[in-house]
Image (cartoon, rainbow, N blue to C red):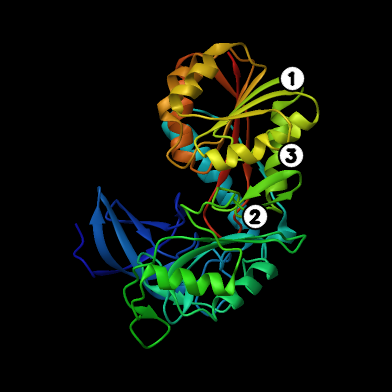
Amino acid sequence: MPASNAEHIVSIDAAAHGGHGVARIDGQVCFVALALPGDTVRIAVERAAKGVLWARIVELIEPSPHRETPPCRVFGACGGCSWLHFAYDAQLAWKRRIVQDCLQRIARIDIAPDIAADPALRRGYRTRAEFHGDGEAWGFYARGSRDIVDICACPLCHPRLNAALAQLRAVRAQAGVEITVNPEGDDVLVWVREASRPGRRTHAGRRPRRAPHNAARRLIRDAFPQAQELGDDAPRAAFSFDGIPVVNGAFSQGSLLLNRLLLDVVGAMVGDARNVLDLYCGSGNLSLRLAEEGRRVLGMDHNGAAVAAAAATGRGTYEAGRESDFAEALADETRDAVILDPPRQGAKAIAPALAAAPADRIIYVSCDPATLARDARALIAEGWRPAACTVIDLFPDTPHIETALRFDPA
């Protein structure tokens, strides 16, 4: 095994799930941070884990034809994105290939995914982000650490989100703050998380001042009177975008604008289904449009605030529940379609009930192709057949991948 910090000249021949470039050293896989397919680089091996090597670039010897100049002074240090230097067409091709490879390798599914993307929204698309403050500066965490990279604006953030960040930067507090903006309105949601515990500052000189969380909370509320946090008695602030509630402190897609791509893909996969079960439904993102069309919809999720907001629209039926409740709903009656959009860890807990569900189709939306493939394998074992797959680019200039996979009975 190569020694730590040993240097090698390698060619990068692939992009891995997670975004690293892939090289081989004496037949061993090596993941290289910020390397792109087509690069020739001198690297230093930093560690070995689970039979693979991890390395950093020491020298770019021959750049990939897909390499671009990133429009950000802190790119490479900041952990907010890692493909800002990757040509957009090449990003899309590799996201498609990563999903295709994951499905084939883990679930033995041979399918060529379609791509849904909006190149006009490659930049300025983010409408939600969590910023971290250390008492002196605000920004994102550095790559691979809890150090804070001081940023004035992010090229991926919508102008309204960058404007909120500028307002936040006037607050000298140590905290994590999630901000969600309406890209077509004036709404700004502010959710205060637990006080951050950063190490040192990057791109700045001083160590952070520690501030009690209560003091941080007061300072943030002075700047954003609408700010809320877990435990507040007041109802959750919310606004509606495309007819879907966006609830403070509850999950919403990182881009409300690119979310439209996801809604179109899922709508096409649902087809003419009239009786729809939506699991991990959140505030009804994938099913409220269906309910508005007069279809019968039951949505279920762990998050009570999100489900209450969906129910308050008067469209469909939305209930809070756990995986055991999801399993009961799956077995309860025959559905035309089951939609699920689980968190990154997937739907392993309900996979047996999902596989046994009396349904005409299943539409599985995932932000992790590996857990999607794992759960797909369980469905295939019980007779389901992958019928359509689309990679939706909700996170341009990052390696994050959203996938929708439709299953029909075999």
- Measure how far apart labels 1 and 3 are at the Cα level: 17 Å
Q: Position of residue 26 (x, y in %)?
A: 27, 55
The reply to whether the C-beta atoms of the residues labelled 2 and 3 are less than 8 Å apart is: no
Which residue is under mark 1?
Answer: 274
Residue drawn at 46 percent across, 31 percent down: 347
Q: Who is closer to the viewer here, 142 or 277?
A: 277
Q: What residue type is labelled 2?
A: Ser
Q: Percent x, y for residue 232?
A: 50, 54
Q: Quadrant of the C terminus?
A: top right
Mark 2 or mark 1, earlier in chain: 2
Q: In this view, does 251 lie above or below 371?
A: below
- Estimate how packed mark 2 is, as few (under 14), some (14 to 19) or many (20 or more) residues with alpha carbons within 10 Å: many
Report the residue marked by disc 3: 264
Secondary structure under the numbered disc 2 in the rendered image: loop
Q: Give the vertical position of 273 relative to 51 (above or below).
A: above
Pointer 1 or 3: first along the chain: 3
Q: Which is nearer the N-term, disc 2 or disc 3?
A: 2
Q: Report x, y in % for residue 382.
A: 47, 14
Any mark on residue 255, and which? 2
